[in-house]
Each structure stands twice: as C-alpha cells, then as structure tokens.
Image (cartoon, grey):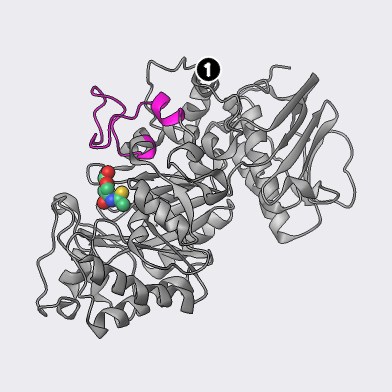
Amino acid sequence: MTTNGMSNLVPAPVSVVPKDGSFGLSATTRIYVEPNTPELLAVGQYLADKLKVGTGFPLPVAATAGAPCAGNLYLTTVDADASLGAEGYQLDIGSDGVRLRAPQPAGLFRGLQTLRQLLPASAEMSSVQSGPFGLPAGTIRDFPRFAWRGTMLDVARHFFTVSDVQRLIDLAALYKLNTFHLHLSDDQGFRIAIDSWPNLTTKGGSTAVGGGAGGFYSKADYSALVSYAAARYITIVPEIDLPGHTNAALASYAELNCNNTAPNLRTDTDVGYSSLCTRSDTTYRFVNDVVRELAAITPGSYVHLGGDEAKATTVEDFQYFFGKAQTSVTAVNKRLIGWDALGQLTSLPAGTVVQFWTSGDHARTAVSLGAKLLMSPANKAYLDMQYDKTTPLGQHWAGYINEQTGYEWDPATIVDGVSEANIVGIEAPLWTEYLTKPADLEYMMFPRLPGYAEIGWSKAEGRNWNEYKVRIGAHGPRLRALKVNFYQSSAIPWL
Ligand code: TNX
C-alpha cells in the first residue's frame, strides 16, 4: 500500500510514533461516530464530503455504540484523554482500522486535518482518482501550543464575496487555524449591514480602493460565514475600526462629523486623516448600535474595535472615545480586542486582547493593564508584504517576507518583557489595498499561512527552516489538488 508517510504533517504534531503497515480506504469503509449527536455526525460528514469525490468511495457516516468492527474509521469523544485539552486529539491507525479520540469535537475536527494530510493528495482531487488511498500505521498525540491561531482578511479596501471568504476559511481549517478576523470597515468601505444605520452600507459600502463597485454583507451573509466557520471550529472575529479609519462611515452620515458635513467617499490608500467626532453623543449612539447589532450575530467572545492609526484624534480624545466605546462591548457580554494603539489607554476591561503589529511600548503597556497579546508583527506576519523584490503582488513597507522569514520567529521573543504567559497566540493579517481578486489572496497566503499555523500550533523546540521547507514542499501536490494559487518559490523543494 502506498501512503503519504507520517513525516510531512503541517503543523508538526506533538508526538508521532509510526508503526509498520497501513490502513487502506476502500469502497466498503464507513465512518462511525460516538456518541450519537448531530455535531459528531456533522464532523464525520465533513470528512466524507472531503474524500468522496477524489476516492469515489461512498464513505457513509453513522453512529455507533462501542468500537465498530475492523475496516472502518471511528471518531469518538468517549474515553478520550482529557489532558489533550480543547483541541487536542489522539489518532491511532492500524491495518485493521482508524480510531480518532478527542475530549472535544473540536479536537476530532483538528485530528481529521491530520488524517487528510496523511492520505495521498489525490484523495482530495475534484474527480475520481485510481488510488490506492492508504494511511500509514502509527499513533499521533497532538495539541496546540497557543489557544488563538488565526488569519485576517481586509474586506474593506477591496470587497470579497461570501464564497471567496468561505474558500479561505476552508483552506485555513486544513492547517488547524481556529480564528478568522474580518476587517469589516475602513476609510474606503463599510461592509456589514447595520439596520439602524442603513446608509453605512448603501452609501459607505458602494465603492473600494481604486473606485470599484465595493459591496457589503447582509446580516444573512455574515451569519452564513459565521456558521461555515463554526462548522470548521473557527471563530469569526468581526472588526469595526474606530475612531480613525472611518471615512466610509463619516461619508454615510453627516452627523458623525464634528462639522456636521459628510466628506466624499474615498478610494485612495491614505491613512490617518479620518476621525469620528469623539465629544458628540451621536457618535456613541452610533458605536453602541453597531456593536449591539454586530454582537447579536456574532457567537464568538470578541468584538474588535480597531483603534489603529487614529492620527486625526488627539490622545485625550482617543482615551475618552475608548472609555465609552469599551462599555458598548462589555454591555453585550463581549470582550474587547483592538490593535496595539490600545496601549495608549489607562485601563482596559478584563479579558481584553491587544493585537501587536508595530509598537512594543504600547504592547507592554497593554500587558501591564492586564491585556493578553495577539502577535501579528508586521515585519514577520503581514501577508500583504511581498515575498521578495521579484514577486508581483503586495507592498514592502514592513520589509520583504519570504517563506523563511515568515517561518523563523517565535511569538514569545518578539516584544521584550512580554513572555509566553501574556500571549494568546498568533494572527497573520491580509490587507487588501493592492489585492483585488481571490487568486491574489491565495498567492499571498500560500505557502506562508501554513508556516504561521505551525508557529501557533507546534512546539518551539526543534523548529527549523531546513527541515520545514522539505515538509511544506511535500504539500505541493495537496495544494495543487485543491487548486490553490500558491507561490511556487524556488526556496522550497516542491514535490
Ligand atoms: C497598517 S496594521 C495598517 C493597515 C494597512 C496595513 C498595510 C494596521 C493596524 N494598520 O491599515 O492596511 O498597514 O500593510
């Protein structure tokens, strides 16, 4: 039986013990789940749907009580090792069958990504392949280093449709990411419908960088993204960037401006010129309505209120603004997340996450105010940076970030004085001033995103580029099977 081996997994698991032999998927293989819950049946069905087309096998999903007979896949939370935690799992593959155990359904889902990667890439092609579809025998025990492993898409500078975003969510799931941050508003566009302030999208969503048609998500669209992500155990974190980066909102409602005059919509890429009127009650009615409506369709714990580059807001006004805006978040039982400019505040609500991208000073202050850091250092983790001088897409204000630079850093050693205990995890943001189509997004994300996923999931000890580049190179056939438009850098020995 040809198999893909156990050595090419990304992110690298905590422990892998290969054994002799293999298990072959066949036309009679069934997927059994225990206990019999809609959630576990859905997890089983997710796997069946991924593999049915390429293998041509029916892979029926059913519940079982006790281990099924030989020749099948068994996914269960029964008798799992609780110390594996919220997303950990143990995968045992023998010639007689496959057993995946996890204390939580999320762990089963993460374990299925491992199972997918152990199969030949052809299993995920969009037409029936001849096989064989073998899984190498052995045992994998695995759990993540960080609780928050994510990416971000800026849908404000250029808009991307629900299905464009779902495709990226699905690709993120393959590498065990668990959060997807949507940057829903900026100077050039406001992209989420708010019933009490309809012009935000009818006017504020009507264009984009370069003057294109823009677009926005209805609440039903947004909910479709939330549930698509939830089915992959990925939490959507919505961002409304305030009080700067707000020209689209200011252009939509004159009363949000201190001079009561709406500016024109903007389609250029300047930053730092816009601000809500921080001393006006209307502003806080607006913030409260937006946060309340957004929170009502966001099951995740966090609402991101931006805060970055508010250069047209004085520090006093910035502090006054967030003093009020944060209460809109806590009033609906959500937690605040914002960019590292929140380090200019003098207090933060309990449970706040501050996203480091540029300022160590602000990040340290935020930690001293009780926040945890989400690490997105621009010079290491910004997916909109060019790979190098020769690659066509992206910018380089924070430097060139080739696959090696993107991989060779550790979240715990970026900000002096901030240790691992103060860090919730890692996010790689994709800003879209200069990215206009889904193929561009894939080119910037792949192959760097799997590297960020590994930084977030795998142990720091022993991570090294020369080993990793071979491992990620083995994902070439898989990315091709999934029709990902990835950058085929010559630094990686692609299979
Ligand atoms: C900085 S990161 C920004 C964004 C830009 C990005 C481009 C951050 C909080 N602000 O407004 O899109 O650089 O790389």
Q: Is residue 311 above or below residue 29?
A: below
Q: Is residue 170 above or below residue 14?
A: below
Q: Position of residue 90 (x, y in %)?
A: 76, 39
Q: Position of residue 301 (x, y in %)?
A: 53, 65
Q: Secondary structure at mark 1?
A: helix
Q: Is residue 256 above or below residue 127?
A: below
Label 1 Cα neighbours within 10 Å, binned few <14 / some 14-19 / many ≥20: some
* Residue 260 shows up from this direction: yes
Is 70 left or right of 446, judged from the image as shown? right
* Residue 204 shows up from this direction: no
Q: Which residue is depicted at the point 22% across and 82% down?
A: 280
Is 60 left or right of 434, judged from the image as shown? right
Q: Position of residue 168 (x, y in %)?
A: 44, 44
Residue matched to label 1 = 470
Q: Position of residue 16 (x, y in %)?
A: 72, 27
Q: Which residues are magenta?
A: 380-408
Q: Which residue is depicted at the point 30% across and 46% down?
A: 431
Identify the main secondary structure in magenta.
Answer: loop
Q: Is 459 within the magenta?
A: no
Q: Is residue 281 above or below residue 238?
A: below
Closest to the observer: 210 or 376? Answer: 376
Is 444 left or right of 19, judged from the image as shown? left
Q: Quadrant of residue 262?
A: bottom left
- The kind of residue on which mark 1 rests is Val
Is 119 left or right of 148, judged from the image as shown? right
Q: Which residue is depicted at the point 36% across and 53% down?
A: 362
Q: Which residue is depicted at the point 51% across and 40% down?
A: 412
